């Protein structure tokens, strides 16, 4: 006698009785080759950045400690010509999204929002900006806590993404996804990922409360995410499959991080006395730390990397909300003062 | 040109040039494609999803202990909404919206099309559970581990999916 389960099995077997297209092999080969090319390109970039970071470290050591108002000039060896870094950054200024000049610190314009912005993210070329703001309209869960929203790169079409408490929004380098930590009204935090175009959500992992306040970082190929696993221990996990990934040990209390390449991670963390902040690169392949600069009595609030120009952007905030945008890359480093800027990332919306 | 023995003795080229990966590709491509087809209900989209899943696996090929479950999980996640190419996404959305026709529109369809539509009407995770349990005959615990969910969730979602598909098949019988 045929059971319901057998009937369904039989029906699904019939449905799956499709011919495998001959083109699957060629398509797979093309995809594998594309990924290889991207990987090789990323390795080349990593080598160049390690050279640049080494130069910056030497410059910082020679220039001394605690010199955040001094413009450090790094002149690494010239290789292939690079695009100039974006002339603009998007930051949080007095609770608003503000487009600022990275050249002279001018506030170029503010983008509309219906709440007070807490944190933001975008990526060069991305069509979206993601940010947390508080409060949104009444009736949301956990009123008063930051909620995650998105808007087009030009500041139009704002839309709520997550109605629970959210933090650390981080748009992937390809601009398609946003990762964030969220919690249901005080419950343990979870790392969520939302496809900004489709609105589909994925749950990556549970995080303990102690590690929830650590930063997230996407790998350059937008395939993996650095998440806090425990105190000082992080793991780099493929987001699409959520497998455990690679474990990484970083200095205590890292509070900003960004991948410069597949193997080089820029991080900031406090010195042991808590008085200063260190900006450094960590080489995942050799497990070595390369300090770039120490900022006295200041905190690096955000790190952002522009792959086209290979330039790192750090927003550094002092004790009296005096802020500076500092760039590090193949070109000479620059420092731009912008009062009240609490965070900032590269901003280069698609034309 | 690099080749490896594929299914039924067919010689296949080697994606990425790794003979072990080529053997894995040859042994898995049919099952992976059929699994993806049941999830997305469209051959061209299933092909994209499977090619992407293999390409994602390739760089981690030497590090992954169990590439079969890894591949299945990548397929499930892609099919759930991770389509990168907008053209693929548009085709998928068009296909899904066609499956959401008004009630009664299934009349006159053959069983295969009814089952395809019934599968697409299931939530993505439930669809994956049904495909793993009843197409691939994986155990509840194996399905739970592969999808990263509890065995109890597998049981409940499989039961719901089964009831939905059973209803689609019953409707067909009654219509005869």
Image (spheres, helix red, strand yellow):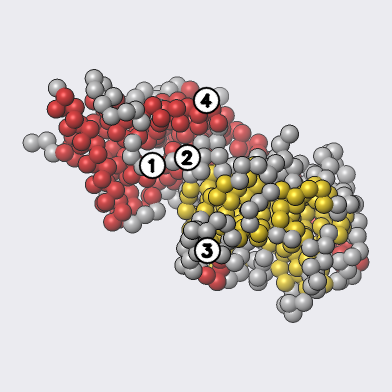
Residue at x-position 20% and y-position 36%: B167
| Place of residue A213 in the rendered image (x, y in percent of width and height, measured from the top left) | 59, 66
Residue at x-position 75% and y-position 42%: A348
Q: Quadrant of the C terminus of chain A?
A: top right
- Could you say which is closer to the camera, residue B58 or residue A172? A172
Q: Quadrant of the N terminus of chain A?
A: top left
Asked if both marks, 4 and 1, belong to the same chain, the answer given is no
| Distance CA(mark 3)–CA(mark 4) | 52 Å
Q: Which mark is residue B124?
A: 1
Sooner in the amino-acid sequence: mark 1 or mark 2? 2
Tell me which corner region of the image, top left, top right, bottom left or bottom right, holds residue B118.
top left
Q: Residue furthest left?
A: A1
| Left or right: where B102 falls relative to B2 | left
Q: Are marks 3 and 1 in contact (CB under 8 Å)?
A: no
Q: Which mark is residue B81?
A: 2
Crowding near the residue tagged with mark 4, few <14, some 14–19, many ≥20 C-alpha atoms within 10 Å: some
- Could you say which is closer to the camera, residue B107 or residue A310? B107
Q: Which residue is mark 4?
A: A26
- SS of the residue at dot 4? helix
Name the front one of labels 3 and 1: 3
Sooner in the amino-acid sequence: mark 3 or mark 4? 4
Q: Are marks 1 and 2 in contact (CB under 8 Å)?
A: yes
| Distance CA(mark 4)–CA(mark 2) | 23 Å
- SS of the residue at dot 3? loop
Q: Which mark is residue A281?
A: none
- SS of the residue at dot 1? helix
Label 3 resides on the chain identified as A
| Place of residue A271 in the rendered image (x, y in percent of width and height, measured from the top left) | 74, 74
Q: Which mark is residue A143?
A: 3
Asked if both marks, 1 and 2, belong to the same chain, the answer given is yes
């Amino acid at each position: 006698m045929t059971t319901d389960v057998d009937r369904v099995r039989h029906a699904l077997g019939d449905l799956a009785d499709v011919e495998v297209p001959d083109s699957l092999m060629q398509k797979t080969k093309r995809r594998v080759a594309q990924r290889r090319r991207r990987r090789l390109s990323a390795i080349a970039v990593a080598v160049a950045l390690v050279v640049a970071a080494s130069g910056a470290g030497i410059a910082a050591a020679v220039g001394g400690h605690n010199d955040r108002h001094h413009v450090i000039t790094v002149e690494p060896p010239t290789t292939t010509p690079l695009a100039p870094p974006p002339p603009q950054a998007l930051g949080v200024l007095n609770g608003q999204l503000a487009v600022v000049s990275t050249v002279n610190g001018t506030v170029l314009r503010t983008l509309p929002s219906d709440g007070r912005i807490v944190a933001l993210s975008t990526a060069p070329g991305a069509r979206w900006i993601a940010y947390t703001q508080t409060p949104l309209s009444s009736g949301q869960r956990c009123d008063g806590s930051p909620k995650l929203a998105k808007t087009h790169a030009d500041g139009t079409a704002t839309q709520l993404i997550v109605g629970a408490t959210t933090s650390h929004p981080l748009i992937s380098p390809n601009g398609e996804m946003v990762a964030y930590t969220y919690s249901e009204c005080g419950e343990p935090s979870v790392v969520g990922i939302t496809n900004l175009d489709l609105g589909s959500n994925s749950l990556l992992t549970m995080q303990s409360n102690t590690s929830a306040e650590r930063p997230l970082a996407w790998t350059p190929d937008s395939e993996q995410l650095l998440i806090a696993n425990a105190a000082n221990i992080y793991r780099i996990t493929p987001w699409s499959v959520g497998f455990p990934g690679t474990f990484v040990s970083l200095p205590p209390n890292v509070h900003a991080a960004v991948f410069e390449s597949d193997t080089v991670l820029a991080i900031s963390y406090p010195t042991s006395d808590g008085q200063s902040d260190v900006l450094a690169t960590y080489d995942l392949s050799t497990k070595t730390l390369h300090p770039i600069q120490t900022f006295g009595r200041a905190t690096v609030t955000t790190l952002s990397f522009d792959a086209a120009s290979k330039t790192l952007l750090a927003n550094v905030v002092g004790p009296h909300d005096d802020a500076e945008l500092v760039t590090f890359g193949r070109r000479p480093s620059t420092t731009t003062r912008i009062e009240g800027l609490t965070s900032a990332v590269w901003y280069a919306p698609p034309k | 040109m690099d080749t490896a023995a594929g299914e039924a003795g067919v010689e296949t080229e080697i994606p990425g040039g790794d003979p072990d990966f080529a053997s894995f590709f040859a042994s898995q491509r049919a099952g992976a494609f059929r699994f993806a087809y049941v999830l997305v209900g469209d051959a061209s989209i299933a092909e994209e999803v499977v090619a992407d899943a293999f390409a994602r696996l390739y760089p981690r090929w030497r590090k992954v202990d169990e590439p079969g479950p890894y591949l299945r999980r990548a397929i499930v996640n892609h099919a759930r909404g991770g389509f990168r190419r907008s053209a693929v996404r548009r085709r998928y959305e068009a296909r899904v919206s066609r499956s959401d026709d008004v009630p009664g529109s299934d009349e006159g369809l053959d069983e295969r099309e009814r089952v395809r539509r019934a599968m697409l009407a299931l939530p993505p995770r439930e669809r994956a559970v049904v495909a793993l349990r009843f197409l691939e005959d994986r155990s509840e615990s194996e399905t739970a581990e592969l999808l990263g969910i509890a065995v109890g969730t597998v049981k409940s979602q499989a039961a719901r999916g089964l009831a939905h598909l059973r209803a689609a098949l019953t409707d067909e019988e009654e219509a005869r």
